[in-house]
Image (tube, helix red, strand yellow):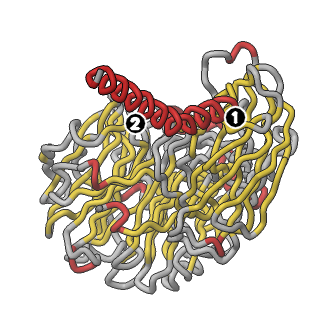
């Protein structure tokens, strides 16, 4: 009997404990059921951009949203949250746009936009969203840390596109950063499942569109060069391609933009080199372009060198320039100089007779920038098409402050568009576009190009898609890190001109470590770039970005070298 009572008591205890556990777990089961009923069946795919945020733009794409509406009927809202480090007072507005639907033939391509919502190439349409391609659904001005963007957009069966726009205030610092995330979204009153397809914690860097398509009645601006003068003035040069984006021969002048405030604002464009209707031929048969710019740091005289083409029937100069010396047969190498910090420029100085071999088909500059060596020698990178129609890269130099120039031997055959840096006193490194593709060619010289030595990094360390690149040397005494640094920029790919990246080397160019790199523009563009040191803490880059023909960004060295 006692044993029976003991068993019964045990059963009661078990039953009581079971009931307690059931009662304890019941809210969780209820919660799970509630969550399952409140969650939308469709997933919202999110792609965060890694492109410059242009301060002058009314719309910058911050997020792309892709939604396959199988069950959902309405996108109610999207909640955006900014990081605490973001200076909210810099932000003018945040907008939500609806971009329409996907074409049936694009099924499976997983696009995040059916078209380019903001053009970088259509004159007059580079600053704001094209109203024909998207519908503004919501706008929040002077946002707080967390904002609600009410969409209330009817969804069509299949893929629906949305995007979030960011507009900055005019006074925003060029070194400001923005970090944000989509905290939640609601479909038909239910929480949408979110799938982020891009990396987390992306930092968005500011930029300025120095030249947009259509500015000064020009169709395109290409081929950047950038220097900092002794007075701290930034001088950016480029092709002004009036009729189209094609290379010489065409109506092309060398343009220059000047900034005295570190790149925040830029003065009205100047034309240091422009030939117009020269020699009885129209302006389009007197194009001059592909500029390279140099600061003589001993005198603050500024030099620009460019290729002038005369005639050629508006065909491409690369193939239409021929052996010889006179302008009716071959492209001319011309220079101009400024002695007042880039405000005014001399008449063209033709140095073709000094440096060109008559057997060469074409002699032209880098393009990009030249340097002043520690001993005062002025050096420009050059390229030429030899008598066998093969291109080669090298340097030209002046020992007398630009009065006379010399060229010796090429560094490597089948190369073009090189940049030069002094890596040690008297030692020049030439970083070259290699027409074989895949990677950069690198050589050094100790005797101004009489002899060359292939660098250990050549054809190994720096990948490229056959595109112009930039290389500068920053000495330890000139930067806050107190380290000798080589800086390099180009499209960090082997195919396609995208993923513009700034890289740093701390061992003279032998290695370019992943932790010493900064991606500044992931989208497609023309891809040319040029770097300059602004001060001990920052560098500037002028480049052909995905958002403007000539984009300037100011980047802290510590953001590159972590």
- Image quadrant holding the N terminus, namely top left
Among the 4 quarters of the image, the one containing residue 17: top left
Q: Which residue is mark 2?
A: 493
The residue under the point 74% across, 63% down is 93
Q: Residue at x 63, y 30 (%)?
A: 33
Q: Compared with residue 424, is residue 306 higher up or lower down, i.e. above or below? A: above
Percent position of residue 108, x then y: 61, 16
In screen coordinates, is 258 left or right of 297? right
Residue 74 position, x and y percent, is: 82, 34
Q: Nearer the viewer, residue 363 or 512?
A: 512
Most foreground residue, 561 or 459: 561
Residue 326's x, y, as percent?
49, 48
Q: Is residue 285 left or right of residue 4?
A: right
Q: Report if the CB atoms under discs 2 and 1 are less than 8 Å apart.
A: no
Mark number displayed over residue 245: none
Residue at image position (40%, 36%) is 493
Q: Which residue is mark 1?
A: 38
């Amino acid at each position: 009997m006692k044993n029976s009572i003991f068993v019964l008591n045990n059963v009661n205890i078990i039953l009581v404990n079971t009931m307690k556990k059931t009662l304890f777990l019941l809210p969780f089961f209820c919660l799970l059921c509630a969550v399952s009923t409140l969650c939308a069946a469709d997933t919202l795919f999110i792609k965060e951009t890694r492109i410059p945020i242009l301060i002058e733009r009314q719309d910058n794409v911050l997020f792309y949203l892709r939604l396959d509406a199988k069950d959902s009927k309405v996108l109610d809202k999207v909640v955006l949250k900014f990081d605490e480090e973001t200076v909210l007072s810099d932000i003018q507005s945040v907008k939500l746009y609806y971009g329409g639907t996907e074409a049936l033939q694009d099924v499976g391509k997983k696009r995040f936009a059916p078209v380019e919502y903001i053009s970088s190439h259509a004159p007059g349409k580079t600053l704001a969203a094209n109203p024909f391609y998207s519908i503004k659904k919501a706008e929040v001005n002077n946002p707080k840390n967390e904002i609600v963007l009410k969409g209330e957009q009817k969804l069509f069966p299949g893929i629906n596109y949305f995007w979030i726009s960011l507009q900055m205030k005019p006074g925003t610092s060029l070194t400001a950063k923005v970090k944000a995330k989509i905290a939640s979204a609601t479909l038909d009153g239910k929480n949408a499942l979110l799938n982020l397809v891009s990396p987390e914690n992306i930092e968005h860097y500011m930029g300025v569109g120095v030249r947009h398509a259509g500015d000064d009645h020009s169709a395109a601006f290409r081929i950047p060069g950038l220097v900092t003068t002794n007075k701290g003035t930034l001088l950016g040069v480029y092709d002004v391609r009036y009729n189209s984006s094609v290379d010489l021969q065409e109506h092309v002048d060398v343009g220059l933009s000047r900034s005295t405030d570190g790149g925040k604002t830029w003065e009205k464009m100047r034309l240091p080199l422009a030939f117009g209707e020269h020699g009885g031929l129209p302006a389009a048969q007197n194009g001059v372009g592909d500029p390279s710019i140099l600061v003589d740091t001993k005198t603050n005289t500024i030099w620009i060198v460019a290729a002038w083409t005369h005639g050629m029937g508006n065909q491409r100069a690369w193939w239409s320039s021929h052996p010889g010396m006179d302008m009716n047969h071959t492209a001319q190498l011309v220079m101009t100089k400024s002695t007042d910090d880039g405000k005014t420029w001399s008449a063209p100085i033709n140095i073709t007779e000094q440096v060109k071999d008559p057997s060469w088909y074409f002699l032209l500059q880098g393009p990009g920038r030249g340097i002043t060596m520690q001993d005062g020698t002025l050096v420009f990178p050059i390229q030429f098409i030899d008598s066998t129609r093969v291109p080669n890269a090298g340097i030209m130099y002046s020992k007398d402050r630009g009065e006379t120039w010399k060229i010796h031997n090429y560094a490597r055959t089948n190369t073009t568009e090189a940049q030069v840096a002094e890596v040690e006193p008297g030692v020049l490194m030439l970083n070259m576009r290699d027409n074989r593709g895949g990677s950069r060619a690198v050589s050094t010289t100790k005797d101004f190009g009489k002899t060359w030595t292939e660098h250990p990094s050549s054809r190994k360390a720096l990948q490229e898609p056959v595109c112009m690149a930039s290389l500068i040397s920053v000495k330890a005494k000139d930067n806050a890190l107190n380290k000798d640094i080589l800086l390099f920029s180009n499209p960090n790919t082997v195919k396609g001109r995208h993923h513009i990246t700034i890289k740093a080397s701390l061992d003279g160019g032998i290695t370019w470590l992943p932790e010493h790199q900064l991606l500044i523009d992931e989208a497609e563009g023309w891809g040319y770039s040029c770097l300059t040191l602004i001060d001990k803490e920052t560098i500037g880059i002028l480049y052909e970005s995905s958002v403007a023909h000539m984009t300037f960004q100011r980047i802290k060295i510590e953001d590159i070298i972590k």
